[in-house]
Image (cartoon, helix red, strand yellow):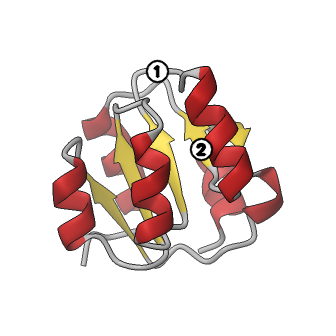
Amino acid sequence: MKLSRIIEKLQLEIRTGANRLDVDVTRGYASDLMSDVMANANERDLWVTLQIHQNIVAVAVMRSLAGIILVNGREPDAETIRKAEAEEVPIMISTMPTFELVGNLFELGISGT
């Protein structure tokens, strides 16, 4: 499913990477531990996290992720936005908690396997 369709269906707010929303999302990955994401996330996964610091962008680039969804209405800091814009990493915001957001992704056909 295209990232743009997920954004539309879940009413996510786009913070960065608006020019990369046509990417196909292959699956989802939810974790707040960057070492876990580095070890287990796959290319074009959509990462769900509450982390907001700039290291999330480095992990997304390293793993070639489709994008990052920040939960609970959390906003990335200015340095994270700057780095994500430079690397063209889509960051979206959801007011939903992780559990609810992941359930909605699953209903859209985005699984973790």
Amino acid at pointer 1: Arg
- Above or below, 79 against 5 in this view is above
Residue identifier under label 2: 91
In the picture, measured across the screen, residue 81 lies left or right of residue 18, that is: left
Quadrant (top left/top right/bottom left/bottom right) for the N terminus: bottom right
Quadrant (top left/top right/bottom left/bottom right) for the C terminus: bottom left
Residue at 39% x, 57% y: name it.
Answer: 59
Residue identifier under label 1: 74
Give percent across and percent down for residue 101: 38, 41
Residue at 48% x, 44% y: name it.
Answer: 69
Give percent across and percent down for residue 47: 40, 55
Residue at 46% x, 21% y: name it.
Answer: 74
Give percent across and percent down for residue 26: 46, 79
In the picture, measured across the screen, residue 68 lies left or right of residue 81, that is: left
Mark yes or no: residue 33 visible.
Answer: yes
Please tell me in which quadrant of the rendered image residue 83 appears: top right
Mark yes or no: residue 109 visible.
Answer: no
- Above or below, 58 against 69 in this view is below
| Cα gap from disc 2 to disc 1, whole angstroms | 11 Å
